[in-house]
Amino acid sequence: MPQAFVPSANVAQLRPSATIATAARARALKAAGRPIIDLSIGEPDFDTPDFIKAAAARAIAGGATKYTAPEGIMPLREAIAAVAGAQYRGGDAPQGLDVCVSGGSKQVLFNACFALFGPGDEVLVPTPAWTSYLDIVMLARATPVPVMGDPDDGFRVSVDALAAAATPRTKGIILNSPCNPTGTVLDADELRAILDLARAKGWWVISDEIYRRIAYERAAPGALDLVEARDNLVVVDGVAKAYAMTGWRIGWAVAPRAVAKTLADLQSQTTSNPNTPAQHAALAALTERDAAEESIAAMVRAFRARRDAALAILAEPGAPRVIAPGGAFYLYVDAGDFPADDGDTGGAFCRALLEEQDVAVVPGSAFGTPGWVRLSYAAAEHDVVTAVRRLVDTYRAATRVPA
């Protein structure tokens, strides 16, 4: 008899990504002929800018198809350090040796958690939070501690709530602003207060800033804008969102040098170097500034127009409550009054939208808030408007609220 597979303790609690699972279901329905509007996945619908693709083609033609250093090519690391150094006002500006480039920001997050945390450690995670944070912390054999934000304030988590959730085992905190799934942007005072608390408590801070360039009414401050010393700070970023380069799989950590070296050593024993041509494409994204800024600005304008069109529908009588996002490209919608036999109102709302209205969104249970749903407006504006109209109509019908 074949031996039954029993997962090891390393992965026993691992869950598949809910966002990827929802997108897979949407693709399957599309393949079956259903006209699905898929607002589930966190991926810009814009093509990678031509100047970036051209840089990758030149790199390939020039022979950049071999191994590199596990932590990435030095020109890219220096370009990342230059961008980070332009933010930083402290006395120890990042250099190339403080940077480790990886196969996307998700790998950076895994490497950082694996290097910084371990059994017995607790890591605070402001909630709702991106679905992978908790699982990545658990893969490091540490314990994630969700800290719920205030839904009446964009789900912001207060310093008092973080301090109350801490124990002597607290080792760090994962921050994300602009936030996935809410789109909430912490202002400078809010972010500084959390960074000051972490320093006073001796916690590591992992600041996931992958959406920082996608902000609307005001720029989103990063941790490096605010700290005077960065010895407890790991900033995670990449080219996926701002440069529409999700499939290129290039992310990075800006960290204290000893941490960056440990991340590189870990990577040398797992994936080795990130994709070589993609590193050269990312280098162009960071160094060909005029073309890059024009591309980012055009994308942010389009996202803002879609956001505003969706929010106008969600402001109508009988529509569900929504968190008005200041950044990223998500709307977080309150499904608390939607009928559900199992109590998972967000899950019930998602199923109704997909099976009855051909609209795919993600249940809030994936992010720690079962009564909510997340939709991405990284889709054509007509599709976003159509989907949100169906969402509002479905909610009104189920809750018997007139238009």
Image (cartoon, grey):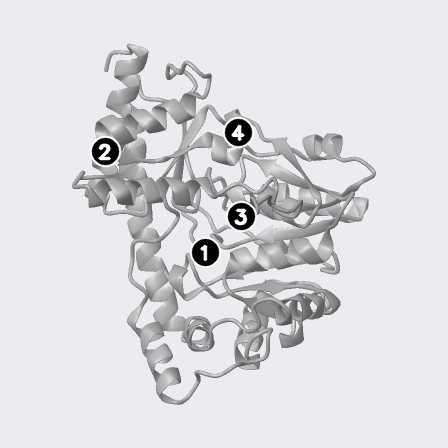
Q: Which mark is residue 153?
A: 4
Q: Write down the residue under mark 3.
A: 2
Q: CA distance from mark 3 to mark 4?
A: 54 Å
Mark 4: few/some/many CA within 10 Å (<14, 14-19, 20+): few
Select label 2 or label 3 by which is in front.
Answer: 3
Where in the figure is residue 210, as x and y percent of width and height?
50, 55
Identify the element where label 2 is drawn: loop
Q: Which mark is residue 213?
A: 1
Please report contact status of discs 1 and 4: CB closer than 8 Å, yes or no: no
Count of all numbered marks drawn on residues in the image: 4
* Amino acid found under the numbered disc labelled 4: Asp
Q: Which mark is residue 358?
A: 2
- Mark 1 vs 4, N-terminal side: 4
- Mark 2 vs 3, N-terminal side: 3
Please report contact status of discs 1 and 3: CB closer than 8 Å, yes or no: no
Residue 333, located in which quarter of the rendered image?
A: top left
* Amino acid found under the numbered disc labelled 2: Asp
Q: CA distance from mark 2 to mark 1?
A: 31 Å
* Amino acid found under the numbered disc labelled 3: Pro
Where in the figure is residue 386, as x and y percent of width and height?
20, 35
- Mark 1 vs 3, N-terminal side: 3
Given residues 137 and 39, the one toward you in this image is 137
* Amino acid found under the numbered disc labelled 1: Arg
